[in-house]
Amino acid sequence: MIRFGTLGAARIAPAALISPCKNSDNAVVSVVAARDRSRAEAYAEEHGIPTVVDSYEDVINHPDIDAVYNPLHIGLHHEWSIKALEAGKHVLCEKAIASNAKEAEEMAAVAKKTGLVLMDAFHYRYHPCFIRAKEIYDSGILGDISEIDGAFHVAGMLEGDIRTLYETAGGVTMDIGCYPISWVRHITGEEPVEVTASAETGEPNVDIFLNAEFTFPSGIVGHISGDMRNGGTPLANLKVKGSKGEMFIRNPLAPQHGCKFEVTVDGVTTSETVKKRASYDYQLDAFIAAVETGASLYTDADEAMHQMKVIDACYEAAGLPIRGL
């Protein structure tokens, strides 16, 4: 049984951790703290968390937990994940794992030194939907791959939200654009050797729209975009184009909420069946296996460093400052 402590009363935690733990016989959320104790108490009562403590320090040092879930704003991921690791706790950290690649490297170094698990919470990667997409890509049935397009757009940004502030490492690429970056990196298994990008900003230095083009060592060209401008059309799509066919996935992000998965080869289109179990449940399974048996992770600390290097490159190419610097 892995006992989690969670930092803050985050909106993402019920779907990302609390519900998966309730669906598992091998994990439980035991401890919570928030900036305001009364808020933590209300959160604990709502979600059945037995212990409320006064501070994040009290969570990471609590003797009755084995792992820490870090869903704080991105600007706090580095500090509190390292503190948790140094306190002897495994860490499941929300994406983006850090403000920049330098921070991610420092986090990975501490994870390696302590021998503890540090997992970048890209839950989609553990769902059978994306695992199947990777199998199809690697099988060669699409022929020579020429282009991959990934996009994640939402209907509008939240005014004044921490995700729209540079001081909290905000920006659409940090919040949702990181997903299509991860999709194209994981489907190819390559890192881009050339990055071009353009962006539209809201608050100073904070992207509310960013698109980028990647050139991979194989010659494949990847296009990604993240958009949280007001009035936008929500979408989450991944498309792979090859000499013999195409693969299209609508909602590779959380396929349990509805997904269209089609493969067209030589003009014949087939549909893939997608499991309805939550991507977050699969992510928890992978975290548990890594902790208990040393199983490898698709999104471990080393992989997270590469992800952040690409995000940094997108900001540099778009003429924006890297977060946290």
Image (spheres, rainbow, N blue to C red):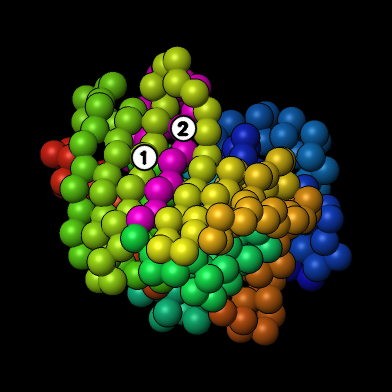
Which residue is drawn at the image coordinates 64% and 76% (left, top)? 291
Q: Determine whether label 1 and label 2 are within 8 Å by CB.
A: yes
Q: Residue furthest bottom?
A: 293
> 51 or 127: nearer the eye?
127
Give residue 200's mark: none
Residue 40 position in % (x across, y down): 67, 36
Question: How many neighbours does mark 2 have within 10 angstroms: few (below 14), some (14-19), or many (20 or more)?
Answer: many
Query: Would residue 169 be found to the left or right of residue 133 on screen?
Result: left
Question: How many neighbours does mark 1 have within 10 angstroms: few (below 14), some (14-19), or many (20 or more)?
Answer: many
Query: Would residue 121 be found to the left or right of residue 198 on screen?
Result: right
The residue where tag 1 is placed is 225
At label 1, the amino acid type is Ser
Residue 81 position in % (x across, y down): 46, 59
Which residue is drawn at the image coordinates 25% and 27% (left, top)? 200
> 68 or 248: nearer the eye?
248
Residue 161 position in % (x across, y down): 44, 24
Q: In the rendered image, which quarter is residue 225 located in?
A: top left
Q: Provide the residue span drawn in magenta.
A: 147-172
At label 2, the amino acid type is His
**Residue 148 shown in magenta:** yes
> 187 or 144: nearer the eye?
144
